[in-house]
Image (cartoon, rainbow, N blue to C red):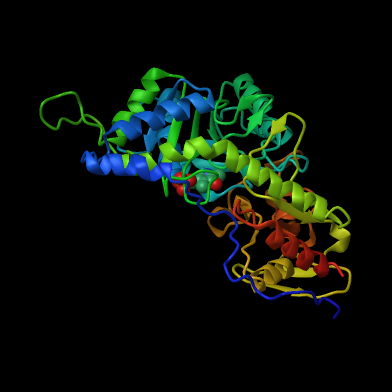
Amino acid sequence: MNKSTDRRPFEKKVWLSSPTMHGEELEYVTEAYNTNWMSTVGANINEVEKIAAEKAGVKYAVALSCCTAALHLCVKLAGEKLYGKPAISHGAVEGKRVFCSDMTFDATLNPVVYEGGIPVFIDTDPDSWNMDPEALEKAFEMYPEVKLVVCAELYGFSGNIRQIKEICEKHGALLIEDAAEAMGATWEGQQCGSFGDYAAISYNGNKIITGSSGGCLLTNDPEDANKARKWSTQARENAAWYQHEEVGYNYRMSNVIAGVIRGQYKYLEEHIAQKKAVYERYKEGFKNLPIQMNPIVEGCVPNYWLSAFTIDSEFMCRQVRGECEALYISEAGKTCPTEILEVLHSLNAEGRPIWKPMHMQPMYRMHECIGKSGSMRAKTNAYIAGGVNDVGADIFQRGVCLPSDNKMTEDQQDRIIEVIKACFE
Ligand SMILES: *Cc1c(COP(=O)(O)O)cnc(C)c1O
């Protein structure tokens, strides 16, 4: 095997994407501490709501404990608008089909399930790696009664989210935009997070800026913003005592975490610039390899949160994935994600497979997934052979997320590029 190169591990692990603090965060946290605003009320929360709305170009932001909570309240708001108030504590979309991104993190659609909805997955556009608008049109043809779509922007590289919104409008459906990975990215000059009727952003530790955790719900409707704020604080009615007419949640953001986020927002552009440099160095470093970087389609200015690539099919060695394990057969001139991830691991660098599509997940395997040419249900086993109509399965089979940390040095990245190149020898 002629796959030797300098593989001495880095002393300090190079992460996929890790938090980067700058100092000002601590000042806001200290201010909260010194004034005893150690609660889910305070100046930092108010500021985060102001900044988040301003940056995203929407009227209102509601600061919450995480993006998943934000998405949950989005589903509740949309459900009430579409189907009326549920009779019980949950079930805002009970028994209703909801069209969802297929190649995403499962937090995108878990809240649909919390509320009794039935996710129907929409296959991925191979050109943008995002929800395929043609497949969405096909889905509305098959299920014209569907009134809700949840769409995520993958890795901070948006597809045509405007077209997704237009298709929703045409069919009288509401759009929830999961912009957890795409804060600061734009489509045709407009911020991701401002296209949906409701949207959610994340300050989880691995996102482009972080509060350690946290998220915001974004909307232009003042009533919806107030409702979400009320639900997030146990749904208390306006009375002297604890008065309750509906079920509530403990979803409000902490003023301590809001302090970190408030400090981080000043560095959003800097982090994006650093991530962009990482992406471009990979692109340049791999220019002679048979790979395709995650696509930037015309109209999108990404935030470059994660760099990723797919290996061209002819250069894939044999790789088989079970439920939780993978095997491959090493072959000269070819490689696969499993081999590349192994090599990255030996270098003390963190890579990751592409997010495994939802229709391939054990819990959603019986759910429908719709592609350009209709239901893919009959073809769910085809992905093993690189099935023709299953774009998500194909990108998953051939794709790798690369170490994309903004603190990675150029030397470290050069060595990562070298060991990956050696996999193709
Ligand atoms: C991270 C992430 C979430 C969840 O964010 P939390 O703040 O951790 O709840 C949701 N959707 C996508 C696409 C994500 O990447």
Tally of numbered discs: 0
Q: Is residue 289 left or right of residue 183?
A: right
- The x and y percentages for residue 91 are 38, 38
- The x and y percentages for residue 291 are 82, 55
- Residue 272 appears in view: yes
Image quarter hosting the N terminus? bottom right
- Based on the displayed image, in which of its 4 quarters is residue 191 positioned? top right
In the image, what residue occupies the spot 36% across and 42% down? 27
Relative height, residue 364 to residue 260 (above, below): below
Q: Is residue 322 left or right of residue 280?
A: left
Seen from the viewer's position, the closer of residues 13 and 197 is 13
Image quarter hosting the C terminus? bottom right
- The x and y percentages for residue 89 are 30, 38
In the image, what residue occupies the spot 73% across and 70% down? 339
Q: Is residue 240 left or right of residue 139?
A: left
- Based on the displayed image, in which of its 4 quarters is residue 296 positioned? top right
Q: Residue furthest left?
A: 241
Relative height, residue 123 to residue 394 (above, below): above
In the image, what residue occupies the spot 79% across and 61% down? 385
Relative height, residue 402 to residue 232 (above, below): below
- Residue 121 appears in view: no
Q: Is residue 219 left or right of residue 63?
A: right
Seen from the viewer's position, the closer of residues 83 and 300 is 300
- The x and y percentages for residue 281 are 76, 51
